[in-house]
Amino acid sequence: MRIIRNFNHDWYFIPEKVEHDLPDHRFELVTLPHTNKLFSRHFVDNNDYQFVSTYRKHFPIGEEISGKRIFVDFDGALLMTTVYINGKLLGVHKGGYTPFSFELTEYVVLGENVLTVYVDATEDKGIPPYGNLVDFLTFGGIYRDVHLRIVDRCHIVTAFARPINVLTSSPSLECDIQLAQWDTNLRIEAVLEDAQGHIVAQQIQDVRSESMTVSFPELEPIELWSLENPTLYNLRFVLSRNGVSVDQEDVRVGFRSAEFCDDGHFYLNGKPLKLFGLNRHQTYPYIGAAAPTRLQHLDAEILKYELGCNVVRTAHYPQSPHFLNRCDEIGLLVFEEIVGWQHIGNEAWQALVLQDLRAMLERDRHHPSIILWGVRINESPDNDDLYTRTNVLAHELDPTRQTGGVRNFVRSTFLEDVFTLNDFTEGIQPPLVRPHLITEFGGHMFPTNTWDHEERRIEHALKHARKHNLQMGLSDVAGAIGWCAFD
């Protein structure tokens, strides 16, 4: 069976690039998530975090790896990451907002091993979101979780569960499974459990190729995932060889229907729902983007319970799995988008956009809270070639969700399923196509601080109220997402 080790503890850190033989006592001992620099509460200079850092971790390997494959999985590091094991280069990952992995199998030894990671947080015009101006701070460091994963040579790579016909009396579930390697005498068992651990359905079938689909036709009545009752099910896949279990993967599933329709409305489980939301940056005082699980959860809870939102847009990149998990658990809808801000780079740059999009989709497509994929660089000019490719990839990897592409001008080529527009007018720009969703308004048009006098803060709140009042009266507008939840 697979072994997953939390790799967040006991890292050595130094805020410069150093040689592999530098003694450990020259480093600082840190825990992930980690920012490459602690900041003041206000007025952060983006030049302060633009340097190369070195992370080092010692870890033992025992006989449990015999015949196994071993990987190191990074949830995210900013901005370019170069990884070595025992002095041997594993590879380089460009991009700071999506997960990546390196295989260690050929290079680990029995006993102590040393992982060395260089994280370059300097601005690189060849890596999204850079290339021109960027209006947000990216920060640096290994700012999300890291895990060590030990698996059988034949193991589950991805498992994507697709609820079907959830509003009928015969809902079903189809599960697309990709294996790392096909072998003879393999069998897969899929078990669907409710929140109490009771078995709802079970399927067992032989494995005949590296790609397969397991179906649960005509399930017993299931409970829908909704904003008021975000019911989650657990789907467990157990892979066995000659009757012996060799791998297991669990994913959470929510049965719900979410669709933006041509009549202008958004429908959740067949009922129209006006969307009230805010954008969210993964930014915190002092620690930059390096927030632990509890703070990621807290942001989702503030959005729903304190600010009254039913939707959040992850501006302008994929965000922490912990944040998305909490959105699933509390019933907060999510519009998640790819990395970028206004600028479109060259062919190599665009290849990284597609790489990030694939990683985002494969990581997050099981989240019931996510209702829309953002497949366009925020506020970028039209680029029909690139955005045709991003739309095709999104629908190929996830045929269950619609796409949007956030722009700041109305006369734009409409390639996506939902026309998503940043509308900073005092009113609402009349939609030219439907469905139409406002994805930014307010915010920096009337900048307000917590220490401002009461009249200014009230006017800031009223500007949000006026925009929502207007969108509530327009059936052509599915909802409005304000700028911004957190400074």
Image (cartoon, rainbow, N blue to C red):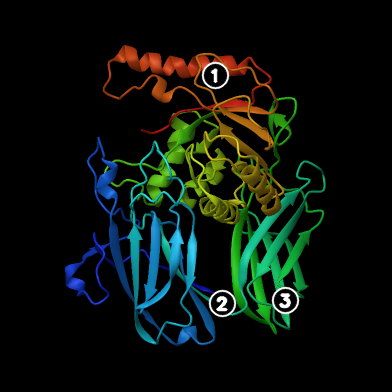
Q: Earlier in the sequence, mark 2 or mark 3?
A: 2
Q: Which amino acid does label 3 sit on?
A: Arg
Q: What element carries label 1?
A: helix
Q: Which amino acid does label 1 sit on?
A: His
Q: Name the residue under label 3.
A: 187
Percent position of residue 466, x then y: 51, 14
Percent position of residue 273, x then y: 65, 28
Q: Name the residue under label 2.
A: 1
- Contact? badges 3 and 1 (CB < 8 Å): no
Q: Residue at x 41, y 48 (%)?
A: 125
15 in relation to 346, above or below: below
The CA distance from mark 2 to mark 3 is: 14 Å
461 in relation to 319, above or below: above
Closer to the observer: label 1 or label 2?
Answer: 1
Residue 228 in view in this figure: no
Q: Which amino acid does label 2 sit on?
A: Met
Q: Is mark 3 on a helix, strand or loop?
A: strand
Q: Name the residue under label 1.
A: 468
The CA distance from mark 1 to mark 2 is: 51 Å
